[in-house]
Image (cartoon, grey):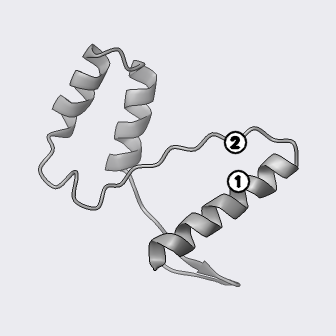
Amino acid sequence: HSTVQCTFVLNETIQYYLNGGNTVHVMLLDASRAFERVEFVKLFTVLCSKGMCPVVARILANMYIMQQFRVRWQTETSD
């Protein structure tokens, strides 16, 4: 149920920007259980050795390591 809602919101957001004449780039990752025991240094080293751009690998590593989130509801923001 929640996946359907998230997919709907994503599709609507993409359509909004496409209708405005923008290019949309999307990267999706199902990390629900995939990364529980992964050695990230090794993962990104292997990805680079397989041809992934080191800049992209660094961006992905940074996104995973430094991830935070806040929820904004009207004028309120969570910690």
Residue at 80% from the left image edge and 57% from the top image edge: 16
Identify the amino acid type marked 1.
Ile
Callout 2 environment at 10 Å: few (<14), some (14 to 19), or many (20+)?
A: few
Q: Residue at x 28, y 16 (%)?
A: 50
Location of residue 12 (image quadrant): bottom right
Q: Residue furthest right?
A: 20
Q: CA distance from mark 1 to mark 2?
A: 7 Å
Residue 15, image quadrant = bottom right
Tell me whether the residue at label 1 lies in contact with that at label 2, contact meaning CB atoms closer than 8 angstroms.
yes
Query: In the image, is 66 to the left or to the right of 72?
Result: left
Q: Secondary structure at mark 2?
A: loop
For image coordinates 42% across by 19% down, the residue present is 53
Residue 47 image offset from top left, x and y in percent: 28, 24
2 lies above or below 43: below
In the rendered structure, the answer to whether residue 52 lies left or right of residue 69 reads left
34 and 43: which is toward the camera: 34
The amino acid type of the residue labelled 2 equals Val
Query: Closer to the N terminus: mark 1 or mark 2?
Result: 1
Circle 1 Cα neighbour tier, 10 Å, few/some/many (<14 / 14–19 / ≥20): some
31 left or right of 17? left
Read off the residue under disc 1.
14
Residue 25 in the image, given as x and y percentages of width and height: 63, 39
Residue annotated with mark 2: 24
Q: Residue at x 40, y 38 (%)?
A: 60
Residue 30 percent coordinates (x, y): 35, 54
Above or below, 44 relative to 53? below
Q: Secondary structure at mark 1?
A: helix
Q: Position of residue 69 (x, y in %)?
A: 46, 66
